[in-house]
Image: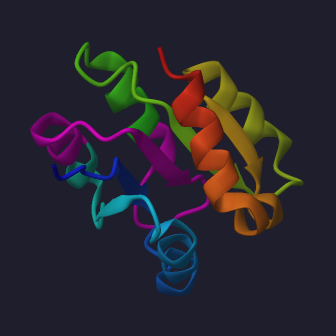
Amino acid sequence: METTNPTILVAVTDIFFYTKVRDALKAGYQLEKARAQQDIAEKTASTPPAAVILDMNDLTIDAFLAIETLKANPQSKAIPILAYANHEEVETWNRAKALGVTKIVSRNEFSARTKDLVEEVIQVAP
């Protein structure tokens, strides 16, 4: 009997940071990469992931728009969102929380605890 690993949608366009995420999650998870803004809605609609990872400082993908898109759709609003941002960006943190991010952490904490954080937000999911 084959078991499939949960899919995580990773909206991180920084190739070096994406590699860190991939390496941290390669045991136990399948990764689906969002390379552009429209990928987030399309990929969550076709195969709902167990969680979404967002880089709040990404210059290619508007993380705030991504959160709004996910939360506005009844099919994706319950998907947990793990976000990270520079720790000094208080307004970014506050806005992400207000929009419904499951958990937001500093870039350093995310880098150090990626797998633990993903498992934590998946368990929080309804």
Q: Is residue 118 magenta?
A: no
Q: Give the percent coordinates (x, y) of residue 112.
A: 78, 67
Q: Is residue 102 above or below residue 10?
A: above
- Seen at 74% across and 60% down, the residue is 113
How is this picture coloured?
rainbow
Q: Is residue 70 above or below residue 32?
A: above
The residue furthest bottom is: 16
In the displayed structure, would residue 22 be above or below residue 109?
A: below
User: Residue 20: x, y in percent?
Assistant: 58, 78
Q: Is residue 64 left or right of residue 84?
A: left
Q: Residue at x 33, y 30 (%)?
A: 69
Number of labels in the image equals 0
The residue under the point 51% across, 51% down is 54
Residue 62 within the magenta-colored segment of the rendering = yes
Q: Quick check: 82 left or right of 40?
A: right
Residue farthest left in this picture? 46
Relative to 119, is 65 on the left or the right?
left
- Between residue 99 and residue 4, name the one nearer to us: 4
Q: Residue at x 22, y 19 (%)?
A: 75
Residue reaching furthest right? Answer: 88
Q: List x then y, in percent, for residue 102.
A: 60, 28
Of residue 32 and residue 90, the one placed in the foreground of this image is 32
Provide the residue span drawn in magenta: 41-65
Instruction: Give percent across and percent down for residue 101.
Output: 58, 30
- Res. 46 image quadrant: top left
* Depth order, front residue of 12/126: 126
